[in-house]
Image (cartoon, grey):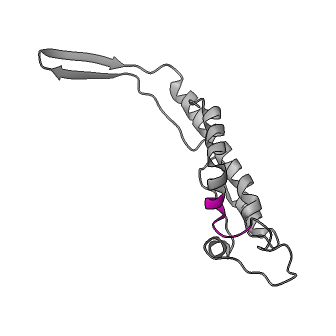
Amino acid sequence: MADKFIFSTPKGEMHEIKMGDGTVKLEIRWNDGFGTKLSKAFNSAQEYIDTQVLLLCQPMVPKDANTLIESGILCTQIGSGEVKYRTPYARRWYYMPAKFSEGSGSGTGTVGRGNYWFERMKQQHKEKILAGAKRIAGGKQ
């Protein structure tokens, strides 16, 4: 996958700040390779987040024939920052409880499956996902 986010670093920036009794001049220089390193870390962290969202939402997504879960896997470009479930009924099942008739398979009656699966997953796993992304990106814990 091509990196979605690319950070660039300027060659050098001159700034001049006028103060009460004089002027302060400064130049900001970026370390060579900083933009490339930052881009790689950010994109790796985003890939981790997208993968974890799909994985941790899976047991919460309404399930009858597995089509909705598979659409999340097939329609999401890992690293894009957008997890997409694309079926004709995905929106309806996200906002409204899905109802299955008796004996129609596992259906939404399985414990934990139902609407607002992303919001529910986020409540349970947000800190774990953020900690993993920080670790990958090299951020402070």
Where, by quadrant of the figure, is residue 13 drawn? top left
Q: Residue at x 73, y 80 (%)?
A: 99
Q: Residue at x 71, y 58 (%)?
A: 57
Residue 34, percent across and down? Answer: 52, 25
Left or right, 110 with respect to 114, comes to right
| Whether residue 110 is situated above or below residue 41 in the rendered picture | below
| Whether residue 13 is situated above or below residue 114 in the rendered picture | above
| Whether residue 133 is situated above or below residue 91 in the rendered picture | above
* Residue nearest the observer in this picture, 113 or 86: 113
Q: In which quarter of the image is the C terminus?
A: top right
Where, by quadrant of the figure, is residue 93 drawn? bottom right
Q: In which quarter of the image is the N terminus?
A: top right
Q: Which residue is drawn at 57% across and 28% down?
A: 37
Residue farthest along the bottom direction in this orientation: 101
Q: Residue 30: in sight, yes or no?
A: yes
For residue 116: magenta?
A: yes
Residue 135, percent across and down? Answer: 64, 32
* Residue nearest the observer in this picture, 3 or 56: 56
Left or right, 39 with respect to 52, comes to left
For residue 141: magenta?
A: no
Residue 60, percent across and down? Answer: 73, 63
Q: Residue 2: in sight, yes or no?
A: no
Residue 18, percent across and down? Answer: 17, 22
Left or right, 13 with respect to 33, comes to left
Left or right, 129 with respect to 31, comes to right
* Residue nearest the observer in this picture, 68 or 93: 93
Q: Which residue is drawn at 62% across and 48% down?
A: 126
Which residues make up the magenta segment? 113-120
